[in-house]
Amino acid sequence: MPHDHAGHDHAHHHGPPADGNFSRAFGWGIALNLLFVAGEAAGGLWANSSALLSDAGHNLSDVLSLALAWGAALLAKRRAAERFTYGYKGATIQAALLNAALLYLALGFILWDTIDHLRHPAPVNGPVVMGLAGLGILINGFTAWLFRSGQKGDVNVRGAYLHMLTDMLVSVGVVVGGALVYFTGWLWLDPAISFVILAVVGYSSWELLRETVQLGLQAAPAGIEVAAVRRWLLDRPGVTGLHDLHIWPLSTQDTALTVHLVRPGGQNGNQFLRDLQHDLLHEFNIQHCTVQLEDEFPLMGAHGCCDEQVT
């Protein structure tokens, strides 16, 4: 049977907006990489380099990723609506998931092209390969630098940072490979380097893919240990138990928490809740919390809301 909650005392807290405005960084990153992709693709066709073509394909996927992440970040700033009561912050999670899918789709097409070049090797214009890849080091390095300050606080920004940093390192590999092909004449080195590029990109992107899938499943964000939050809550003054503790991402950088705390005969409830909100934000970076205080554990029925009881 349904049950009532004792002590219906609720608290809501919305954290501050994310630090930093990366619209300019996204704009510069997209513009520079579009120009570079066009030049690299043309150079790859002219030089007959599968390494350059694979790098251009990956850079194009990065442009799409930057555009999606930028669009989601702008959408997340819109105010909540009647139906979208949490606003549109979840768009950042959906964009991250889509970016991961697009990345691995692009890797599949690049792998197919690289296998074809390995089966049918052709002469490569080494100086063109080295020149374009060297330009990629500068462009991707500069773009990564634009995102360096925010890459620890937002998986979208971190994704952009890691993609650009990886591309810079891959371009270094292409320069080295172009030099080796030029001086040795070993044509198989070009597609072999392309395989290395695919392996590096796939490996470096795996952690981001796993994290975005977890965010999509509303798992507690990385860096927040649910057991530690539970122990911390139970240590609050007067708290004798808790139930229905839920922690989930509202976006790639905003976290929500709901919990029922058992605090028999608790005094100064409002001050307790204000302190709780403040400490959850500073201890665990949880920006939005909803807390219900109860005098005792409610009766459990067939349709009870409690998932757990902890004392």
Image (tube, helix red, strand yellow):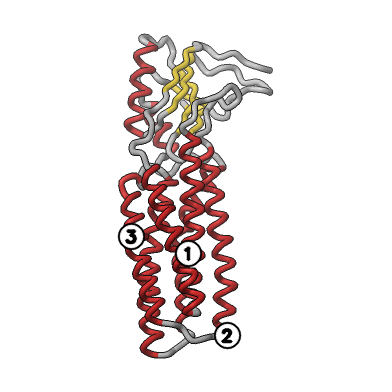
Please, what is the three-letter code of the amino acid marked with disc 1? Ala
Give SS at disc 2: loop
- What residue is pinned by disc 1? 38
* Residue 216 image offset from top left, x and y in percent: 55, 43
Please, what is the three-letter code of the amino acid marked with disc 3? Gly
Residue 285 appearing in the image: yes
Q: Residue at x 39, y 62 (%)?
A: 166
The quarter of the displayed image where residue 111 is located: bottom right
Q: Residue at x 56, y 42 (%)?
A: 217
Mark 1 and mark 3: Cα distance apart in space: 18 Å
Give SS at disc 1: helix
Give SS at disc 3: helix
- What residue is pinned by disc 3? 141
The quarter of the displayed image where residue 118 is located: bottom right
* Residue 115 image offset from top left, x and y in percent: 57, 77
Q: Residue at x 52, y 29 (%)?
A: 87
Please, what is the three-letter code of the amino acid marked with disc 2? His
Residue farthest toward the bottom in the current orientation of the protein: 185
- What residue is pinned by disc 2? 120
The quarter of the displayed image where residue 81 is located: top right
Nearest-to-viewer mark from 1 and 3? 1
Q: Viewer-proximal residue, 225 or 185?
A: 185
* Residue 239 image offset from top left, x and y in percent: 40, 20
